[in-house]
Image (cartoon, helix red, strand yellow):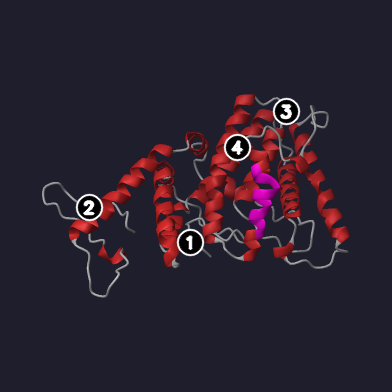
């Protein structure tokens, strides 16, 4: 990469050989060392500028993730999908679903809710980038539409309520039990049932599923998973404990996803279309700078020895 940090010392003024990363205009015409140094210095200045744009709210949320337990325990496989199509998961969709449930819990201090909103909003910028860079098949494009158009932007950027079609009105929120609030979320199954009725339950390709239906099905499975986890073990939980637990799960899933940022940077630097390469490399440089602290905090973490089947990404950042 052009922006690989130099390994120079002020005494010998020797630099790492970066010539293999440069697209030459003519065969056998090598760039002078001075030119190479100028290119590298330019990239490093851009990185340093971008480093001033760290997302502090997101960093605070990631600090709540000490392992990837939330990813390991987040498993909706035991809850059947509301439609026959095998669902392909993503990073962003469960994050959004869990966040919508968390902010619907009553009696949580507004500052905590606002901080979660801001943190997740920042995190989604990067989860979408990871998915866009590493999952380019049409089925993943459709899932991204579900998160961006159907849920994410309306629900988590500058808003104070869940998305309209998943909204719980004030008089619906339960004052008796935090799990009763979660129960309301799987009322979204009506959205999927309406879709099934309109299609006579005929097979629909995953690429053609409406974003609203994908989002509703995700919400249903996640809400049911949370309820079964606590009710099957006869566990009592307060609203504060549930909010904390959901926040921790969100942080773990975000952290697991963001371990893929270095790979995204490499992919962006290898843009094959020459006319797009400069812009792609500059975007990669900016991303590297803006996520410096995220990368530092996650690079020492040991991901669990598992692969998220259907998520398209492994915990080690290797694309399946």
Residue at left offset 77%, top offset 31% = 177
Q: Is residue 78 left or right of residue 48?
A: right
- In this picture, residue 299 sits left or right of residue 4: right
For mark 4, what is the residue? 247
Quickly name the residue at label 3.
106
Image quadrant in which you'd find residue 111: top right
Residue 7 is tagged as 2
Assess whether residue 148 is covered by the magenta stretch: yes
| Earlier residue among tags 4 and 3 | 3
Mark 3 lies on a secondary structure that is loop
Q: Are marks 3 and 2 in contact (CB under 8 Å)?
A: no
Quote the CA–CA distance across marks 4 and 3.
15 Å
Q: Nearer the viewer, mark 2 or mark 4?
A: 2
Magenta stretch bounds: 142-153
Left or right: 109, with 16 as reference point: right
* Disc number for residue 318: 1
Q: Looking at the image, which is closer to me, 258 or 139?
A: 139
Query: Which quadrant, please, contains the N terminus?
Result: bottom left
Residue 310 pos. (x, y %) = 62, 61
Mark 2 vs mark 1: which is more N-terminal? 2
User: Which element is circle 1 on?
Assistant: loop
- Of helix, strand and loop, which mostly describes the magenta segment? helix
Q: Secondary structure at mark 2?
A: loop
- Residue 68 in view here: no
Measuring 76% from the left and 48% from the top, which residue is drawn there?
A: 220
Q: Tell me the element at label 4.
A: helix
Instruction: Report the Cα–Cα distance between label 4 and label 1.
Output: 26 Å
Would you call the spot at circle 1 few (<14 residues within 10 Å), some (14-19), or many (20 or more)?
few
């Amino acid at each position: 990469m052009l922006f690989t940090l130099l390994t120079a010392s002020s005494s010998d003024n020797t630099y790492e050989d970066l010539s293999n990363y440069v697209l030459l205009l003519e065969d056998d015409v090598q760039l002078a060392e001075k030119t190479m140094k100028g290119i590298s210095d330019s990239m490093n200045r851009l990185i340093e500028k971008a480093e001033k744009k760290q997302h502090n709210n997101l960093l605070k949320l990631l600090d709540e993730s000490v392992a990837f337990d939330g990813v390991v325990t987040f498993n909706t496989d035991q809850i059947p999908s509301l439609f026959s199509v095998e669902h392909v998961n993503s990073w962003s969709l469960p994050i959004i679903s869990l966040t919508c449930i968390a902010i619907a819990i009553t009696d949580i201090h507004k500052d905590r809710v606002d901080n979660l909103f801001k943190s997740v909003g920042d995190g989604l910028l990067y989860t979408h980038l990871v998915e866009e860079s590493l999952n380019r098949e049409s089925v993943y494009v459709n899932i991204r539409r579900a998160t961006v158009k159907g849920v994410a932007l309306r629900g988590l950027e500058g808003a104070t309520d869940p998305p309209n079609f998943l909204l719980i009105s004030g008089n619906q929120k339960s004052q008796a039990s935090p799990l009763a609030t979660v129960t309301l979320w799987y009322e979204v199954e009506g959205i999927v049932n309406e879709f099934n009725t309109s299609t006579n339950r005929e097979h629909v390709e995953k690429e053609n599923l409406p974003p609203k239906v994908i989002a509703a099905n995700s919400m249903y499975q996640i809400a049911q998973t949370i309820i079964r986890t606590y009710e099957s073990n006869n566990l009592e939980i307060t609203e504060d404990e549930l909010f904390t637990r959901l926040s921790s799960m969100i942080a773990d899933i975000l952290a697991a996803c963001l371990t893929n940022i270095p790979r995204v940077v490499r992919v962006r630097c290898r843009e094959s279309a020459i006319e797009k390469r400069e812009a792609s490399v500059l975007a990669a440089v900016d991303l590297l700078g803006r996520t410096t602290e995220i990368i530092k905090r996650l690079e020492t973490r040991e991901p669990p020895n598992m692969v998220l089947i259907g998520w398209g990404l492994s915990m080690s950042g290797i694309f399946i």
